[in-house]
Image: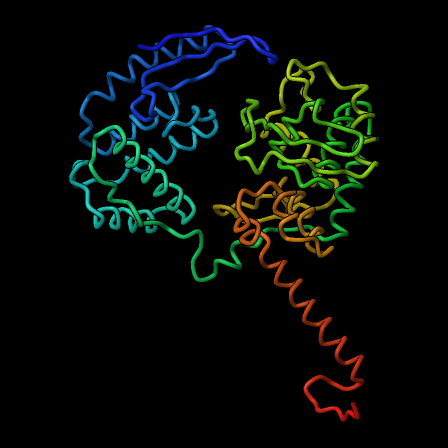
């Protein structure tokens, strides 16, 4: 039976729920909440969910529903409950899984059935959605195994790679040129001086754009940045705001990092502090009401006007109609920052740490094409050095009296 315990510490009062769990050695797991109401709602959800877990799951759609409930109410595989934005993405993948005409019950599935499902995904969905959906189905089967509904995971070892024959080209991110970045920052300066209304909005947007350009921070990280983590020479990344504006910790340990900034940027941020609205979450860039900025509204209110002012809009045909869109996404500022680190021949481990990548493979996958260019430059330098020393093209014999 679950119980609620009140805890008071340096960070204030919280409410800890202890509940039975077969996944821990002690037989109990814990969940912490800021309010008693949230803790009580959690225990109520536990009761209904435990009843569902005890019911024998026979079909794939039943397993999808149970997995989504676990993600939302108690957290899968011993983790915390997922954020609303993540849950919505899981639900999207769940709808894809339910769309497939499963010929067998859950317990009867074999690896060949998962291969058929994978082929159907690749034929009917984008490669990226197919890969993510198959990964989530693997997670579903693992959870069902933990809950005792299946003995084995027939999806083990079956996956979809992130790219195909042209994976390297497809993985290359769009990076603005130096001149385009000057145009972007110049546009941010111009928008802040157009009129009184623009000046009020861009007093906040301008330091955000500059911070993103000189730190490589993710949009979720600077939208969720608290004043306590801003210092005269650096920022500390400890939390994020998801696309729905919900504040939470960074997604991985690697995301928690310190980034040093030029004086120009920190001075700009502290200048903004004098006009910053009050925020219960102590946010650096809150809305006028003190809440985190929503990602969609930030794109519409800041990024789109910025791209237009910088003359970085492109036109493409979608379903027979001419549609204008920004040439670059918000993430292009992060990618540009990383490209300059690579250009400056910064150590690869430093780049990984600064960008907050949990694995070096992520850094290599995203920026591998730039690193190849750097390796080519090293080779060219070696050839030029040899030519300068020998005074002749490399590869030809040189007489020596040594």
Residue 81 picture quarter: top left
Residue 196 found in image quarter:
top right
Q: How is the image coloured?
A: rainbow
For the C terminus, which image quadrant? bottom right
Residue drawn at point x = 43 percent, y = 58 percent: 164
Question: In the image, what residue occupies the spot 24% across and 44% down?
Answer: 154
Q: Is 162 on the left-hand or right-hand side of 322?
A: left
Residue at the outermost front position: 402
Q: Where in the figure is residue 25, as x and y percent of width and height?
A: 33, 25
Q: Write the residue at 29% across / 46% down.
A: 156
Question: Which image quarter holds the N terminus?
Answer: top left
Residue 227, horizontal then vertical, whole percent: 71, 22
In the rendered view, tell whether residue 37 sits above or below residue 148: above
Quick check: 305 above or below 4?
Answer: below
Q: Is residue 216 above or below residue 26?
A: below
Which residue occupies 47% across, 61% down? 166
Report the number of discs.
Answer: 0
Q: Percent position (x, y) of residue 269?
A: 78, 28
Residue toward you, 21 or 70? 21
Does 280 appear above or below 126? Answer: above
Position in image of residue 401 (x %, y %): 79, 93
Q: In terms of depth relative to the viewer, which is nearer, 324 or 368?
A: 368
Left/right placement of residue 147 relative to residue 361 reads left
């Amino acid at each position: 039976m679950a119980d609620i315990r009140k805890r008071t510490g340096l960070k204030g009062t919280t409410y800890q729920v202890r509940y039975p769990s077969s996944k821990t050695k002690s037989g109990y797991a814990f969940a912490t909440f800021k309010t008693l109401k949230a803790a009580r709602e959690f225990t109520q959800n536990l009761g209904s969910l435990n009843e569902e877990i005890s019911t024998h799951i026979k079909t794939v759609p039943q397993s999808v529903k149970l997995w989504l409930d676990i993600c939302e109410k108690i957290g899968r595989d011993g983790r915390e409950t997922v954020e609303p934005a993540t849950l919505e993405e899981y639900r999207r993948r769940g709808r894809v899984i339910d769309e497939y005409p499963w010929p067998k019950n859950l317990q009867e599935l074999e690896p060949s059935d998962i291969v058929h499902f994978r082929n159907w995904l690749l034929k009917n969905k984008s490669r990226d959605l197919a890969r993510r959906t198959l990964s989530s189905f693997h997670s579903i089967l693992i959870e069902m195994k933990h809950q005792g509904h299946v003995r084995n995971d027939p999806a083990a070892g079956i996956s979809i790679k992130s790219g195909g024959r042209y994976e390297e080209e497809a993985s290359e991110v769009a990076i603005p040129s130096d001149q385009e970045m000057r145009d972007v920052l110049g546009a941010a300066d111009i928008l802040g001086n157009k009129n009184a209304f623009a000046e009020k909005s861009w007093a906040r947007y301008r330091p955000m754009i500059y911070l993103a350009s000189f730190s490589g921070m993710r949009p979720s990280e600077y939208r969720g940045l608290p004043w306590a983590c801003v210092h005269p020479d650096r920022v500390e990344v400890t939390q994020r705001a998801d696309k729905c504006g919900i504040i939470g910790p960074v997604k991985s340990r690697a995301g928690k990092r310190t980034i040093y900034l030029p004086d120009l940027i920190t001075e700009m941020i502290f200048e903004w502090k004098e006009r910053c609205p009050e925020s219960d979450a102590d946010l650096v860039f809150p809305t006028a009401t003190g809440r985190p900025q929503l990602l969609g509204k930030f794109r519409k209110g800041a990024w789109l006007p910025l791209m237009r002012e910088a003359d970085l809009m492109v036109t493409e045909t979608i379903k027979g109609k001419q549609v204008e869109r920004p040439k670059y996404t918000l993430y292009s500022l992060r990618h540009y920052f990383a490209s300059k680190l690579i250009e400056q021949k910064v150590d690869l481990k430093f780049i990984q740490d600064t960008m907050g990548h949990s694995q070096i493979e992520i850094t290599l996958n995203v920026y591998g094409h730039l690193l190849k260019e750097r390796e080519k430059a090293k080779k060219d330098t070696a050839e030029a050095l040899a030519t300068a020393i020998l005074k002749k093209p490399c590869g030809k014999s040189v007489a020596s009296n040594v």
